[in-house]
Amino acid sequence: MNKYLILMFVLTFFSAVSQLLLKLSANEPHEGRLGAYLNKKVITAYFIFGVVLLLNTYAYTKVNLKYGPVIDTFTYVFVLLLSVLVLKEKLTGWKLLGNIMIICGVLLFSLEPF
């Protein structure tokens, strides 16, 4: 497997982590309107987003472009896992079904034609 595909897959996890940080920050009280945007969690989340963007852009130059959007869909799977494990959100049947559909779609896309 191409090491850049693996990098893109790892970057989807970090993208989900940054979304988790934004959610954690949104759930906390902040002093004033500016405090909601200028706190450690939000700044860290946007820093992670920036690094992911730069590394993903570089990785796209090294892989077949058709794989990028497929790998990016795993962000939804990681967000679900992190929200259940860290935020203790309820795992509903619809969320689970949606993520199973995503994984099945990735598997179908990954099959080589005969």
Image (cartoon, grey):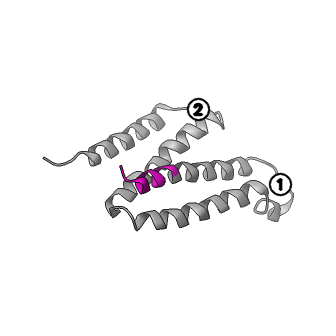
Left or right placement of residue 91 versus residue 102 in this view: right
- Seen from the viewer's position, the closer of residues 3 and 92 is 3
Image coordinates for residue 13, horizontal then vertical, percent = 54, 48
Image coordinates for residue 44, horizontal then vertical, percent = 71, 57
The span shown in magenta is: 1-10
Q: What element carries label 1?
A: loop
Image coordinates for residue 32, horizontal then vertical, percent = 85, 61
- Which sits earlier in the primary sequence, circle 2 or circle 1? 1
Left or right placement of residue 67 versus residue 53 in this view: left
Q: Which amino acid does label 2 sit on?
A: Lys
Crowdedness of circle 2 by 10 Å Cα count: few (<14), some, many (20+)?
few
* Residue depicted at x 61% and y 48%: 17
Image coordinates for residue 62, horizontal then vertical, percent = 39, 64
Q: Is mark 2 on a helix, strand or loop?
A: loop
Q: Measure how far apart labels 2 and 1 are at the Cα level.
A: 26 Å
Label drawn at residue 30: 1
Q: What residue type is labelled 1?
A: His
Label drawn at residue 90: 2
